[in-house]
Amino acid sequence: MLRLTMRLPEWIKIPAADLHQTKNLLRSHRINTVCEEARCPNKAICFSKPTAAFMIMGNCCTRNCAFCSVSPGTPEALDPAEPERVAEAALELGLRYVVVTSVTRDDLPDGGASHFSSTIRALKNALPDAVIEVLTPDFCGDAKALETVLNACPDVFNHNIETVKRLYATVRPQADYQRSLEVHRVAAAMRPDIKTKSGLMVGLGETADEVREALTDIRNAGCDFLTVGQYLRPAKINLPVVEYINPEFFEELKAYALGLGFEFVASGPLVRSSMNAEEMYNSVIAL
């Protein structure tokens, strides 16, 4: 692992592209995306395809994770028309693979699980041939809420671990490492027919051994797909980058994770949970 704290290294190149067509379509349907709210460095790549990770249940989060630029605070009431708007936008974009994520809504009795379910069902009705991936919060460990989402039959269920166990109190103070692993254990047991996926950031001060331990824990929890990417500070209020990780180490992590039994691993500086999700899924299903 390579420690560089002053500026972006040469292997991290954030592309630029014309995003207006996709952005205008999303605005017309009043749709939020995690691509914009979380200031994803790959937004140009995804919006130019076009594709997007829809972010439901508003743009205000009940948690305040130190790595995330989504605004914390008191969210507004859910919009019952949002699932249909998401489906209409996905249809207009011509998506074959749809990613739906959300802010965390600890204020709701089911954490928003029923809203996820409604969105999945609306998408299946509008795009019956599309693959649907959901990236959910932990629902405070509520197995019934998780079951509500899984019973809507997404093709891929994603819940990101985000960081190693030691750093949870700093990076995700309102979350819990074991609880997030349990989300995967419960999902894999409830619906073994649904592919599961998780993601990890590096560069926050973790050791190589801690990363390997986290990958082992994620796989042992029953996770099928894995993404590993470089943490990049989205705003000055967020945690600073401790290390920029050399690309060779990402390759080492990929080999290690594949050796653990993951079906597919994307590991690299600009890898993000939803980036190239369609390619990841199709490469496994085609086997």
Image: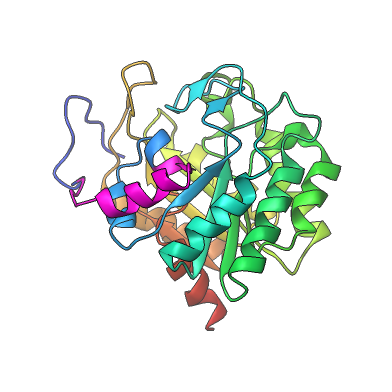
Q: Is residue 168 visible?
A: yes
Which residue range is magenta in the image? 14-35
| Residue displayed at 56% across by 51% down | 85
Nearest to the observer: residue 18 or residue 250: 18
| Residue displayed at 40% across by 43% down | 27
- Asked if the stretch drawn in magenta spans residue 149, the answer is no
| Residue displayed at 44% across by 34% down | 207
Q: Is residue 270 visible?
A: no
Taking 233 as reference, is 162 above or below it? below
- Asked if the stretch drawn in magenta spans residue 17, the answer is yes
Nearest to the observer: residue 214 or residue 34: 34
From the top left corner, tell me how far across and down residue 261 is, in percent.
Answer: 59, 65
Taking 238 as reference, is 158 above or below it? below
Is residue 129 left or right of 114 when viewed as pictured? left
Nearest to the observer: residue 38 or residue 184: 38
Is residue 138 left or right of 242 when viewed as pictured? right
From the top left corner, tell me how far across and down residue 106 is, in percent.
Answer: 71, 26
Taking 257 as reference, is 67 above or below it? above
